[in-house]
Image (tube, grey):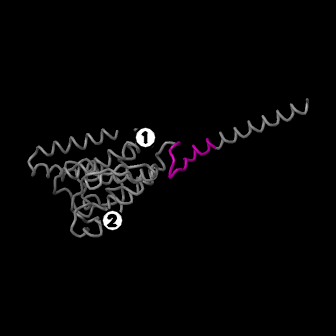
Amino acid sequence: MTWSLVAINTLITVFLSFLPTIFANAIASQFAIVPAFISGSANPDSTELLIRPWLTLLTYGFIHVKWSHLASNMLVLWVFGDNIEKATGHIRFLLFYFLCQIAGGLTQVVSDPSSLVPSIGASAAVSSIVGGYLLVRPQARVVMLVLGVMTVNFRAYWVIAGWMIWQLAEYLIYQADSNVAYWGHFGGFVTGALLIVLLRRPDVKIFGRPGPRSALRSGFTSTRRRLNRLKSAIRAFLSRQKK
């Protein structure tokens, strides 16, 4: 599923790149989320939208006009997405991805419900992947290219902490002059961290701790082993007494 999402996003961007800029932007605006349209503070009828405003919560994450935007999102999805997919399973991974994309979009709407600035890109869904990864694989090693000449292994929690600080710093510095949907990123990250707890497989640990079903199963197994050892000790004792 991870590779399929990467492929779909890339193919859509390739298609848009072959169109004249005015047409590409027109298509992007049709499938982008516009907070004012979703919140109802502005009437979308005059724009002749092809789909209902609330449906754009499902489509906006697949639209990238800039290659740099696509590359940064797909790199994170490629590096972290397969581990989240293994932790949840294929179908639940898709559910996780789309729910987080919707949550990120709604967070952006709530942050500025009267905004007419369209938002596009998979950043909210990708942020959820990062949030989920922090919980299920915080100690994993992530290879980073430093200064373009050498690779260094960092723990995942350091990489993700750096990413969070970078996002927060950009928001604080550029929020007044930027069209980047930072609130969508934050909403996706938090939603991903919450949903991974609910959608992960029973044997997948959170911060090194097993899920309730896995812990219960492990407890039963441990108790059974102790009882078997106790039975063996009693039998051995009784056997010695008979002799």
Q: Residue at x 45, y 43 (%)?
A: 87
Q: Residue at x 16, y 57 (%)?
A: 46
Q: Residue at x 36, y 60 (%)?
A: 162
Q: Where does label 2 land, which residue?
A: 168
2 lies left or right of 42: right
Quadrant position of residue 230: top right
Q: Position of residue 138 (x, y in %)?
A: 45, 52
Judging from the image, what secondary structure is the residue with disc 1 in?
Answer: helix
Q: Amino acid at mark 1?
A: Lys
Q: Is residue 52 above or below residue 173?
A: above
Q: CA distance from mark 2 to mark 1?
A: 29 Å
Q: Which mark is residue 4?
A: none
Front-most of residues 143 and 6: 143
Quadrant position of residue 89: top left
Q: Amino acid at mark 2?
A: Leu
Q: Per the image, is 199 magenta?
A: no
